[in-house]
Amino acid sequence: MKTRVRSGILRPLLPVVAVWFPITGSTAAAELDDRMADAWTVAAQRSAGTVEWMEDSYGSPGMFSRYPTVANTSTGKWTTSNSSGDWHAGFWPGTLWMLAQKTGEDAWRQRATAWSQPLAATTNTNHDIGFIVLGSMGKGWYFHDDCNDPDGSYREFARNAITVAAGKLNSRFNKPNESGVPVPAGCIRSWDGFQSPYPVCIDNLMNLELLMMAYEMNGRLPEHRPWFDHALAHARTSIARHLRADGGSYHVVRHFDTGPQIGGIERKNTLQGYGDETTWARGQAWAIYGLSAVYRHARRDPGTDASDILAAAEATADYFIARLPHYHSADSYNHRTGDHVPPKDFDAALGEPVGPWNDANDDYNSSSGTGLGDRKPATHVFTPRDSSAAAIAAAGLIELAGFMADPADRARYLGAAEDILTCLISYDGPDGGSDPDYLCAPGDTANPGILKEGNARWTEANRSLIYGDYYFLEAMARLEALKARELLDTTLGFGRTGGNVCLEFERHDPAPALAFRVQKSTDLIHWTTVAAKTGGGPWSGDVEETPAAEGKKRVRVEEPAPAARGFLRVVTRALDGSAP
Ligand code: GLY
């Protein structure tokens, strides 16, 4: 039922025109929209199953301090962690925030809030604090606005947690050695007491967003400037030290933490991939996503030229796309038409390339820092896939596409992301079954998650991984938000009906993972929301919707517009700060 908003004196900011452009999407795009709608349904079903299982296993409220991590391959249920410092911890609350945004249902918001709460005081003491806090508090921060957090208390809570975490992460830049001497590596140390000396994994690129977000959300204070500068410096060091000339990547770079070469490279090796000189697929995906996120923040910093970051993001993306099984015909063991999910390591089947960090005899001595690891032979067999790497790359490619000045580049990255998502949702390869290979069927009992065929590390069996699920939903949400904004841009129009001004635009039906707010103002400073909608939730306010072509709805908001000056606008909010 319509409820009419009568307050306000309005006149449109833009000329009074209402021009409608027909939107003709390709059949493939429409098919992906349908597939994503189905995948969201599967995601909600599977996540509801996880909530129920957590409640049965741990009881409420105890279950809110336990976090699903990876599947237990024997039971088909989640392995859980009860540590707020576990690197996996933020992905489950983040999954719940995305379901809350997409469905508009309050039950998901309540669960997201409850599971995020303990992570505000995460006990993590290494680089993973970024994963933990961005997934929980970061998503919670973006979820809230003046409609659902009128007094700003949730955002204040989240901002505080993010700020404290950023301070901790920043303290790891050039972290002092045991004698208290700063190690001038030019980057954030990953772990303590593991992979020493001074290890920096490519995954760290993902956590720089925490520093840059905290700097921005606190109003770019001078005392926080080192957070931004250190994030940018780390990205540049990582580009120089983790990336190879062909755009591939090393997993871990270790640095001398004492002696004449302090801060210099001690060696490069893998922890989760096949060999020291191979490219671990998820590490490559972290690079695409992480560098794109850094560029997002760096490009809006006055005076910063981050074109080198963008170029590096493109190089990592180009490497990843070219080696997907669908394209990489040189690797006959893995080449499969229609398969856009990477092998867990890009080089295993054809053998570890020769490089400066391997040789033929296993002579590395970690005490003296001399010698090299063995060069791994070609496996000459099919390499199991990693669905989590595909999901992370898809989310990163969608953001990267938004930065491209050339429409052909934009289409290439967006197309690659769409192919990956299509494959994750519906690829059914020669595995003997008739279910999709990567998306869990609603009744799947072998895996507890949304996706299957994720690989945590080279030596482990494939399974559901909580981070694969998180980035899969994020990729779908990003793509939907991008398309919804394009539709809004191309269909937004103003008009008059008698003494009223009306604003019209089209939205997708089913709803995208995007919040719409229609707002009015008389001074362009103070805005009042007259109509609001979050994902699949209902409109609040006075809105008329009529069916439009191709699964879309036309939205019309009408307000009285007497002679005095007034303005109407539509703002949209996605669940992260990604471009455009
Ligand atoms: N440490 C993050 C990962 O396994 O990719």
Image: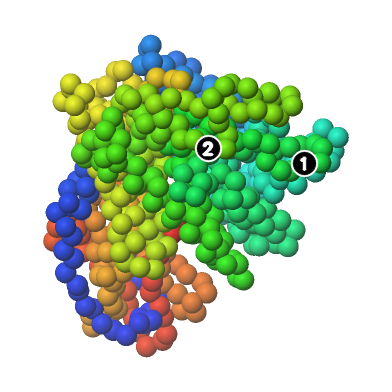
Residue at x 49%, y 77% (from the top left corner): 524
Up-down: is 5 above or below 82? below
Check whether the beta carbons of the residues at disc 1 and disc 2 lie within 8 A of each other. Answer: no
- The residue to which callout 2 is attached is 355
Quick one: which residue is furthest to the front in this view?
360
Q: Residues within 10 Å of mark 1 (few under 14, many from 20)?
A: some
Residue type beneath disc 2: Gly
Q: Nearer the viewer, mark 1 or mark 2?
A: 2
Q: Residue 261 at what x, y percent from top left?
A: 77, 41
* Residue 202 can be seen in this image: yes
Residue at x 86%, y 35% (from the top left corner): 179
Q: Residues within 10 Å of mark 2 (few under 14, many from 20)?
A: few
Q: Tell me the distance, in whole angstroms, between the alpha carbons under discs 1 and 2.
A: 23 Å
* Residue 100 can be seen in this image: no
Q: Say which of 14 and 107 sits in front.
A: 14
518 vs 263, left or right, is left
User: Mark 1 or mark 2, which has the lower sequence index?
Assistant: 1
- The residue to which callout 1 is attached is 262
Residue at x 41%, y 30% (from the top left corner): 351
Q: Quadrant of residue 180?
A: top right
Q: Secondary structure at mark 1?
A: loop
Q: Residue 153 at what x, y percent from top left?
A: 58, 49
Residue at x 49%, y 35% (from the top left corner): 354
Q: Say which of 528 and 504 sits in front.
A: 504
Residue type beneath disc 1: Ile
Q: How many marks?
A: 2
Quick one: which residue is furthest to the right in this view?
179
Up-down: is 523 above or below 329? below
Up-down: is 470 above or below 147? above
Q: Say which of 382 and 105 sits in front.
A: 382
